[in-house]
Image: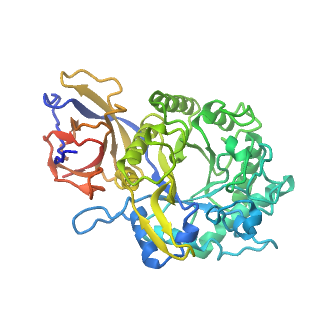
């Protein structure tokens, strides 16, 4: 790939550059969604990595959470602004009897068989709560895959081929709510970490979740979710806990606005939880429950028309019922054939660029206010931002970063909590408006934001195999220069700062790269 220095043009006139293939104009009068945070989860690695030698933990934490720059102005990390903590159900204590084969996928539980709590459990994960907070993360989310094994119908944290109902005994619904309240209070008292959000269900509509045994998880019907959430809310009010309850981490966008590979007991989640007409399942007036729904973008990323159309359908339904949206989990799956499916960790731009396109579509077309990757650290699969190579005794090992991690940083490091996404108008060389001008799925994709400190941020993806030219424009006389940070397959280009640009220079976007531009005085 031919190396070129990337240039950016910022013009404050209305004329189009005759040199640029496409010209992007930020529409300052058209603010869109507020961006809340970018995130990843500690599952299932941090309970092991979090007990490694401290210097190894620090390297991982710097990569994930740091917003500092090195002596050359290069970001030391991707600056995640929220951290997801997996509240365990107790499969670790059960060992092989858990029927979950891999120790990596088992988790400890704070709750003990006698009803007491051991706040020294989940030590490795709690270490990373601390490391995140030390690096400036101030928002934390606790999520569950299963209720504690002491409360489940089969005595396990996995569904083991049961039907599609919640693996929770009827007499333990209130116990489950008290457990969650106790976890919120206990972790704050023990570690000084407040969970701002609680997600009590994970992919309850996923047909995979009916099978087991691979990992902690349980299906649930909408009525079961509503019953449990109302009791959790009641317990939170009783205990004066202001943690927001988020629902329902859908396994597939299609389950959120229709039904997909399931029945009426599970689909149409937006309508069921946020329409007052859905009396049995309505949660819109429930204390602590945000007018927000969370979903996972698995299985909806290909073919390219579906990547766009499913998100438009989702956005239409969200707007109809006035509900906000977070994308809270994704990684590469078997149907992501464009990059060879999920098998085998990929350090290169192949996976990174594919994921950047997903991020762009989730934000631009579905209106996601938060975007969250699945696992922060993984093994030989395309589900981790960082690749671990763990010693057989699990006490030490090594880690490697990836272009995927740095690509997420093109968003998370620079689009800070409270930023507002702004509309963009695109015109061609002749000045004609380009339909869908911010999104050429095989070429340039551009999104723009304004941080709370007034900085403008523009993220430009070039999916093409050839360099592309464009101008970026905003009518803000305070903007005198732009600092670009580029990620590409070129060694060392991982949020690499490029030459600071004057406002009238043309942007030449290298092939298969992502560049973030931050305005300066």
Q: How many marks?
A: 0
Q: Position of residue 314 (x, y in %)?
A: 54, 32
Name the residue nearer the viewer: 323 or 438: 438
User: In this rendering, would 36 be left or right of 243?
Assistant: left
Q: Nearer the viewer, residue 415 or 46?
A: 46
Q: How is the image coloured?
A: rainbow
| Apparent side of residue 407 relative to residue 48 in the rendered image (left or right) | left
| In the rendered image, the vertical position of residue 5 relative to residue 240, given as above or below | above
* Residue 118 falls in image quadrant: bottom right
- Residue that lies at the very extreme toward the bottom in this rendered image: 53
Image position, residue 509 (x, y; %): 23, 41
- The answer to whether 303 is drawn above or below residue 287 in the figure is above
Which residue lies at the image location 62% right of the left edge and 35% below the top edge? 256
Q: Position of residue 388 (x, y in %)?
A: 48, 64
Q: Which one is nearer the viewer's eye here, 349 or 285?
A: 349
Residue name at image x 38 percent, y 65 percent: 66
12 relative position to 46: left or right: left
The answer, for residue 134, to whether it is visible in the render is yes
Q: Is residue 69 above or below residue 337?
A: below
Place of residue 277 in the rendered image (x, y in percent of width and height, measured from the top left): 71, 30
- Residue at left offset 48%, top offset 79%: 53
In this rendering, the answer to whether 298 lies above or below 137 is above
Name which residue lies at 42% across and 62% down: 64
Q: Which corner quadrant of the image does residue 124 belong to? A: bottom right
In this view, the residue farthest toward the right is 171
**Is residue 193 among what the camera can see?**
no
Position of the N terminus, as image quadrant, is top left
């Amino acid at each position: 790939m031919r190396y070129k220095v990337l240039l950016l043009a910022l013009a404050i006139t209305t004329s189009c550059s005759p040199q640029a293939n496409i010209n992007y104009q930020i529409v300052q009068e058209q603010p869109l969604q507020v961006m809340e945070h970018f995130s990843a989860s500690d599952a299932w690695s941090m309970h092991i990595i979090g007990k490694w030698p401290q210097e190894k933990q620090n390297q991982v934490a710097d990569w994930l959470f740091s917003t500092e720059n090195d002596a050359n102005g290069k970001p030391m990390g991707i600056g995640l602004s929220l951290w997801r903590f997996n509240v365990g159900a107790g499969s670790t204590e059960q060992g092989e009897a858990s029927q979950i084969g891999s120790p990596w996928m088992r988790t400890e539980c704070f709750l003990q068989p006698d009803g007491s709590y051991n706040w020294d459990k989940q030590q490795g994960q709690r270490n990373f709560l601390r490391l995140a907070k030390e690096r400036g993360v101030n928002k934390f989310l606790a999520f569950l895959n299963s209720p504690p094994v002491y409360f489940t119908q089969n005595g396990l944290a996995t569904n083991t081929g049961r039907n599609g109902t919640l693996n929770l005994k009827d007499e333990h619904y209130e116990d489950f709510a008290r457990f969650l309240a106790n976890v919120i209070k206990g972790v704050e008292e023990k570690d000084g970490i407040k969970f701002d959000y609680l997600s009590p269900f994970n992919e309850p509509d996923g047909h995979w979740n009916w099978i087991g045994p691979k990992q902690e998880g349980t299906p649930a019907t909408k009525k079961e979710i509503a019953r449990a959430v109302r009791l959790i809310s009641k317990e939170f009010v009783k205990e004066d806990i202001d943690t927001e309850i988020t629902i329902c981490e859908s396994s597939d966008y299609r389950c959120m606005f229709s039904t997909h590979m399931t029945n009426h007991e599970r689909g149409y989640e937006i309508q069921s939880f946020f329409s007052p007409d859905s009396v049995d399942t309505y949660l819109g007036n429930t204390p602590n429950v945000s007018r927000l729904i969370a979903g996972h973008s698995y299985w909806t990323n290909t073919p390219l028309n579906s990547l766009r159309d499913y998100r438009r359908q989702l956005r239409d339904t969200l707007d109809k019922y006035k509900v906000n949206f977070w994308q809270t989990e994704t990684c590469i799956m078997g149907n992501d054939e464009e990059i060879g499916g999920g098998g085998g960790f990929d350090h290169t731009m192949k996976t990174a660029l594919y994921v950047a396109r997903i991020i762009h579509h989730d934000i631009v077309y579905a209106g996601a206010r938060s975007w969250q990757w699945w696992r922060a650290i993984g093994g030989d699969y395309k589900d981790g931002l960082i690749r671990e190579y763990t010693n057989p005794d699990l006490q030490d090992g090594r880690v490697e970063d990836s272009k995927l991690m740095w690509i997420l940083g093109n968003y998370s490091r620079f689009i800070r909590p409270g930023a507002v996404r702004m509309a963009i108008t695109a015109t061609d060389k002749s000045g004609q408006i380009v339909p869908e001008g911010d999104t050429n799925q095989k070429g340039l994709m551009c999104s723009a934001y304004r941080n709370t400190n007034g900085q403008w941020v523009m993220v430009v993806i070039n999916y093409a195999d050839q360099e592309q030219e464009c101008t970026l424009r905003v009518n803000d006389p305070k903007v005198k220069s732009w600092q670009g940070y580029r990620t590409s397959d070129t060694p060392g280009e991982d949020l690499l700062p490029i030459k600071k640009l004057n406002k009238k220079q043309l942007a030449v976007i290298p092939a298969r790269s992502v560049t973030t531009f931050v305005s300066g005085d």
